[in-house]
Amino acid sequence: MHVIIDDVKFEYTSVPVLHDINLELRGPKFVSILGPNGVGKSTLIHCINKILKATGGSVLIEGTNVDAISIRDMAKIVGYVPCTSTYAFPLSVVDTILMGRHPHSTWKSKDSDLDKVYDVLGLMNIKHLAMRSFNELSAGQHQKVMLARGIVQEPRILLLDEPTANLDIKHQMEVTRLLRDLSIEKNMLVIIISHDINIAAKYSDLVILMHEGTIYSVGTPYEVITEKNLKTVYEVDSRVITDEGRPHVILCERTDEGDRIGDTANSTDEMPILS
């Protein structure tokens, strides 16, 4: 997939949110969007999937402006998983995930669609939830079901807003690894918003760092996740070390004298960034 974001801006009733967004993405690739709260990360992906219409510039998918793509055709190309599910589906987990097949459905295709649903249930390791009511699940289980619904849609681009927000650290890593592997196996462009810098650094092919409504830096994890960039964007002191060939961030607390706790490798006051 080929996505071009050309000089995009967005504003709510004259309040600017995004400006000067220029980006070109090609799949398959696993991309993480990082940045503090309120910098426009969710607004950016909403401009890609037509939830919002950019107030300036254009978004093109495979050379076609998204404004010219119908909602149904868009759903065949782009899948979207929101940060948290506020939906109340009085349905079983199977039927909730089956809703993701709607863009592809015909009157005789339900059996094959159900096969795909059960394949994804196995992939997400939630087959045991198949006949449970969606409304009876925990927040973490809700999130996995919504992820499954996005995956079963079989989009060429999958957009996810903090897909691991309600998961413990083990399942955060499992889901992020799964999404990275899906980008390769399914030839997909997977784009996630994340607040976990270290997990993004561990699995991403490309990192987009946003600051004050625009893209501050874009590149490999090593190019983007630097002490200087984190200081500018997040206003925190840090040390960036190498762990298994990837950057790993350690936060440093300043003392009253201005020295950084965590500057030495043996410090016990180092604290990794976790979501």
Image (cartoon, rainbow, N blue to C red):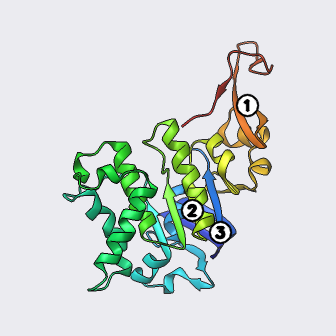
Tell me the distance, in whole angstroms, between the alpha carbons under discs 1 and 3: 31 Å
Q: Tell me the quarter of the picture where residue 264 sits.
A: top right
The answer to which of marks 1 and 3 sits earlier in the sequence is 3
- Count of marks overlaid on the render: 3
User: Which-is-in-front pick, marks 3 and 2?
Assistant: 2
Callout 2: few (<14), some (14-19), or many (20+) C-alpha neighbours within 10 Å? some
Tell me the distance, in whole angstroms, between the alpha carbons under discs 1 and 2: 32 Å
The answer to which of marks 1 and 2 sits earlier in the sequence is 2
Which residue lies at the image location 61% right of the left edge and 47% below the top edge?
Answer: 35
Looking at the image, which is closer to me, 101 or 238? 101
Which residue lies at the image location 62% right of the left edge and 49% below the top edge?
Answer: 34
Residue 49 locus on image (x, y percent): 49, 71
Q: Mark 2 is on which residue type?
A: Leu
Looking at this rendering, what residue extends furthest in the top direction?
A: 257
Name above or below for residue 51 compared with residue 191: below
Residue 100 locus on image (x, y percent): 36, 69
User: Which-is-in-front pick, marks 1 and 2?
Assistant: 2
Which residue lies at the image location 69% right of the left edge and 68% below the top edge?
Answer: 22
Tell me the distance, in whole angstroms, between the alpha carbons under discs 3 and 2: 9 Å
Q: Mark 3 is on which residue type?
A: Pro
Could you say which disc has been placed on residue 182 in the image?
2
If the image is split into quadrants, where does the C terminus sit?
Answer: top right
Q: Are marks 1 and 2 in contact (CB under 8 Å)?
A: no
Callout 3: few (<14), some (14-19), or many (20+) C-alpha neighbours within 10 Å? many
Q: Are marks 1 and 3 in contact (CB under 8 Å)?
A: no
Q: Which residue, given by chain and number where applicable, does mark 1 sit on?
A: 238
Q: Which residue, given by chain and number where applicable, does mark 3 sit on?
A: 28
Name above or below for residue 27 compared with residue 241: below
Q: Secondary structure at mark 3?
A: loop
Looking at the image, which is closer to me, 154 or 164? 154
